[in-house]
Image (spheres, coloured by chain):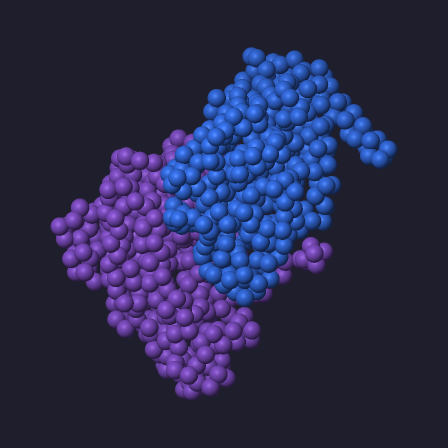
Chain colours: A blue, B purple
Amino acid sequence: MSDFIGELLPPDRLMLTPGPSSIHPRIYRAMMSTMVGHLDPWFLNMMMNEVQVLLRQVFRTENRTTFPISSSGSGGIEASMLNPLEEGDEALICVNGAFSQRMAEIAERTPARITRVTAPYGRAVDPEDLRRAGKGKKIKVVGATHGESSTSVASPLDEYRKVADELGALLVVDCVSTLAGMPIDVDRQRIDICFSGSQKALSAPPGLSPITVSPAGEEAIRNRKTKVQSWYFDLTTTMNYWGKERTYHHTPAIPLLYAFREALRMVAEEGLEARWERHRSNQRAALAGLEAMGLKPFVENPAERMITVTAVQVPAGVDGKAVQQQLLDEFNIEIAGGFGPLKGKIWRVGLMGNTSQQRNVLLLLPTLEKVLTDQGFQVPAGAGVAAAIRSYSESRLAAAVK
Amino acid sequence: MSDFIGELLPPDRLMLTPGPSSIHPRIYRAMMSTMVGHLDPWFLNMMMNEVQVLLRQVFRTENRTTFPISSSGSGGIEASMLNPLEEGDEALICVNGAFSQRMAEIAERTPARITRVTAPYGRAVDPEDLRRAGKGKKIKVVGATHGESSTSVASPLDEYRKVADELGALLVVDCVSTLAGMPIDVDRQRIDICFSGSQKALSAPPGLSPITVSPAGEEAIRNRKTKVQSWYFDLTTTMNYWGKERTYHHTPAIPLLYAFREALRMVAEEGLEARWERHRSNQRAALAGLEAMGLKPFVENPAERMITVTAVQVPAGVDGKAVQQQLLDEFNIEIAGGFGPLKGKIWRVGLMGNTSQQRNVLLLLPTLEKVLTDQGFQVPAGAGVAAAIRSYSESRLAAAVK
């Protein structure tokens, strides 16, 4: 059978999805660098230190415990829930989509008592609902997802922080789909545990989940009465590997760390503010174009829209999946559909990291127009591209005025 | 600070350690292939299918559930312990080194009752001790480590299988350091859960833990009364992602899967028997050389020696760490030391996958001789290399006679 398994020949896709995002050649080049062992002195000192210094800048934190976990972003959810929670604890989890639901599901596997505070898909959880759910309870953790990429809703973290303060709780935030693409400032916003994924707005390959833990978060974890129920995601020991001691824990994915370091360097070179503004400007143009083509954003409230991912409704009578397939077949462009209750109802366009580029916006709009037209949906000819160009011109003018 | 973090420039090491092993250029090339999304039809069908077909050949199994977990090998331990074990269950874990101890530690984080059956470091657990420990008990899982790479001891799996049969238990085997380097035959040896690491005798980058589960193992997992205490390592759901359904679970490390597929292809091209024989012949030559230099193997019983990793005792009066450091500084060659109770007492030489080559053996012996001489240890000049060459000649002759 293996006689028939030949050379690896993947198609050459442009991934305009909520991750993974397409990877810059510089990052591939770094990933190809000679691999060393994970106990090599160069790796333990130089390499790991540099990754941590750069990562703290992206998180905007001085937290000592800041490092990439050897897992996908879902491993970050697992680490952030399993470490602070044990028997006798209570947590509130904001649930408004598939990934925040995953956070709740993971928390519910601990012996802690979990309350889900929900919002309809397409909305952020109301801080008042969170306040009400916690009233009179001793809450240890408030968990929320910054960018719920299954719906493209962004949540009001500062409001959640206020509630967490009132409750004396730790704030745990999933910023898998937002870090380095939307403003996040771990120290200023006083997020106690914040984690992300390598393959989203950082545009490194998937496989790492950067995490940072505040001193208060660390204290809560160190004061546990019982062992963390996962050895692999036990931060009390991985903190020692990435801490001063460098105590061996497990073998990390060294080439992924090389790639990740290069991705972090590219963020540092661009500057976080400039990077956020780039994401903003491309999302604004893409959304203007999509709306001009007659597509409606799934998230009604502009204040609750993510910058890195934009969901639009599949118009009545159009087969969403067929549109995606044609984009893939004719143009090698991947956009995402909805899943779970939103299957077939939305498309999700990701413009994150290396894919947040003007040229990608000005490629997506006409190719999508072509496909929609083929699929029988009436698009005002050229309106999408025209609106995007207008948006870019306005951004330029606004920047010039400043 | 990031202004001072420049281009990634790792040293060019030859890793003769118990993993990671040095990577063949073909594997790097595959890893560089254009990344696609994890929900891309090409990836979901072609790519994932091919990885599974090739992986079944390496494990020598027809198990449906055979796939790489997105974690280091330690994640494989976690998955193999957390999935079958729940409240009310009982397990016996063979402990004779750091990695088998890790298996016990992980099992002890489940609510199941765990009994450690121990052997001194440098020995395999006696099957009779295992039998005695299980007598009269209802044992669900017998866990063992095939190659305990912290000591270079290989364990008698077939004997353990007999005991597990007598007890009506599942046999769970860690073959992180042995798969594709030492004979293992999952179906014939009736191993119920068997897992490995990508970075050892498979010589792919670290970051994946291939696992296979027998129908009996699957049944035990599906019949659980409670949820698996880890969402990330829950095989009941990841089996669906890698099963026919391809139900989205998490984003795997796509470039690592590309590399892994190429590593599996290389195993298929070489043939498992030929690969095992290559490992045997290089280990034999290396050990002959090391012994001729006056170094004593740490594992006394030849039947209990691993083929992929060989531990030798640090001679009295020699600073083991200094030898390693000089090998690194002068020759860019990494060998490993002992850890835990064996710190400073042994060296561990790994000849696995791409590093199991005659030229590496004939490079290690003279460089080590030079370093040992510098460090004041009397080595019979040239004896190591001479013994290795003799061993290779004998292997050639023996092969010719066949």
Q: Locate residue B188, reporting x and y percent.
A: 24, 50
Residue at coordinates 68% horizontally, 33% vertically from top-left?
A: A360
Question: Compared with residue A184, is residue B182 higher up or lower down, i.e. above or below?
Answer: below
Q: Locate residue B374, reporting x and y percent.
A: 50, 84
Which of the pair A305/A294 is nearer the observer?
Answer: A305
Which of the pair A27/B298 is nearer the observer?
Answer: B298
Question: Compared with residue B314, is residue B58 higher up or lower down, i.e. above or below?
Answer: above
Which of the pair A110/B175 is nearer the observer?
Answer: A110
Residue at the extreme right of the image, as rendered = A401
Question: Compared with residue B48, is residue A337 higher up or lower down, i.e. above or below?
Answer: above
The C terminus of chain A appears in which quarter of the rendering? Answer: top right
Instruction: Using residue A361 as the reference point, say whether residue A170 is left or right of it.
Output: left
Question: Compared with residue B349, is residue B191 higher up or lower down, i.e. above or below?
Answer: above
Residue at coordinates 79% horizontally, 31% vertically from top-left?
A: A395
Instruction: Using residue A21 as the reference point, say whether residue B337 is left or right of it.
Output: left
Answer whether residue B306 is visible to the viewer in this image.
no
Q: Locate residue A52, reporting x and y percent.
A: 60, 54
Residue B140 location, quadrant: top left
Residue B342 location, quadrant: bottom left
Residue at coordinates 29% horizontally, 38% vertically from top-left?
A: B221
Q: Locate residue A296, reporting x and y percent.
A: 64, 18
Which of the pair A337/B337 is nearer the observer?
Answer: B337
